[in-house]
């Protein structure tokens, strides 16, 4: 039989310990100002995470993105289905750098934000917090794209497991108002090594990849829609340069006379891409006489 006075002392000590633990543990994520922004970033400090509204989202429009019409049509169709409440897929955009992967995601936000689309940017190191982010937005009337830019994982990183779980690996069904759009230069998101090919087994006429290869492929396969990007041709590069030069107010005469310089600029950068074309157009516009661009 426990002495009542002793029991009361034990309870008081337990309450004291719990109160101290409450001061140490991070509080649950605070509700953001949903009406104050259409784009958010997941921020962390001192073990506490929260959604921070982006005051000035990137203004790029779909009409600004040229020479990738097929890729644009596919992501727009998927996003339109999502916003309308129809079936839609998580999207993995992979391939050549600087060819419009991230820009397309930002542009579809601008295209559909008036219809209730919202975007949450999450750094890959914070992917472990995806369940908390999903809990914050589940049940809300808006549609949310969780955006992971330049996503790839190195050997030993484990954050990809949280991504796999949210994509299609948890006992809980993914919320109907959440999709994940990710960009990467790697198709399988993780490094692949020559030694892993030695694990492949042949059974009769069938090839069976080893466990390491299967693990890496299984992550990218959870994205229902793959959209690939390829290096620009010279004509595509010049077309994108001309588009941005016009946007910056450069005259057609100057644009036509600057094509060789634009090609040399790309050669010096070792890349013929939309990003490089934009950078040269910006530089060219900045070098024009005041009022005479």
Image: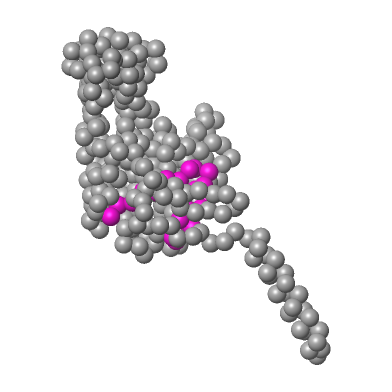
x and y, in percent, of residue 48 in the image: 56, 54
Closest to the observer: 36 or 203?
36
Q: Which residue is drawn at 54% across and 36% down?
A: 154
Up/down of 196 relative to 117, above or below:
above
Q: Residue furthest left?
A: 252
Magenta stretch contains residue 126: yes
Q: In this view, does 203 lie to the left or right of 247?
A: right
Image quadrant in which you'd find residue 283: top left
Q: Which residue lies furthest to the front in this view?
A: 290
Coloring basis for residues: one colour
Residue 210 in view in this figure: no
Closest to the observer: 14 or 226?
14
Q: In this view, does 252 lie to the left or right of 138?
A: left
What is the count of numbered marks? 0
What is the quadrant of the C terminus in the image?
Answer: top left
Magenta stretch contains residue 52: no
Closest to the observer: 69 or 110?
110
Up/down of 203 relative to 198, above or below:
below
Q: Residue at x 36, y 27 (%)?
A: 98
What stretch of residues is rendered in magenta? 116-136
Q: Which residue is drawn at 44% across and 47% down?
A: 41
């Amino acid at each position: 039989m426990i002495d009542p006075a002793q029991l009361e002392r034990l309870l008081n000590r337990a309450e004291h310990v719990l109160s101290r633990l409450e001061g140490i543990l991070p509080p649950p994520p605070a509700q953001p100002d949903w009406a104050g922004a259409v784009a958010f970033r997941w921020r962390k400090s001192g073990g506490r995470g929260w959604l921070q509204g982006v005051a000035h989202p990137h203004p790029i429009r779909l009409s600004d993105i040229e020479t990738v019409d097929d890729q644009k049509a596919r992501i727009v169709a998927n996003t339109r289905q999502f916003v309308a409440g129809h079936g839609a897929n998580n999207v993995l955009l992979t391939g050549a750098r600087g060819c419009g992967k991230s820009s397309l995601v930002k542009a579809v936000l601008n295209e559909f934000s008036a219809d209730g689309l919202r975007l949450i940017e999450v750094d890959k190191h914070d992917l472990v917090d995806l369940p908390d982010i999903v809990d914050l937005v589940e049940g809300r009337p808006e549609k949310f794209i969780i955006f992971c830019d330049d996503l790839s994982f190195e050997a030993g990183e484990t954050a990809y497991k949280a991504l796999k779980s949210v994509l299609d690996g948890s006992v809980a069904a993914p919320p109907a108002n959440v999709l994940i759009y990710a960009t990467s230069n790697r198709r399988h998101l993780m490094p692949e090594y020559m030694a892993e090919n030695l694990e492949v087994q042949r059974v009769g006429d069938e090839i069976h990849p080893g466990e390491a290869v299967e693990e890496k492929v299984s992550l990218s396969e959870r994205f229902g829609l793959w959209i690939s990007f390829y290096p620009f041709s010279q004509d595509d590069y010049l077309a994108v340069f001309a588009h941005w030069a016009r946007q910056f107010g450069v005259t057609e005469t100057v644009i036509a006379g600057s094509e060789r310089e634009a090609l040399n600029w790309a050669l010096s950068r070792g890349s013929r891409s939309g990003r490089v074309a934009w950078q040269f157009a910006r530089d060219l516009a900045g070098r024009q006489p005041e009022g005479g661009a």
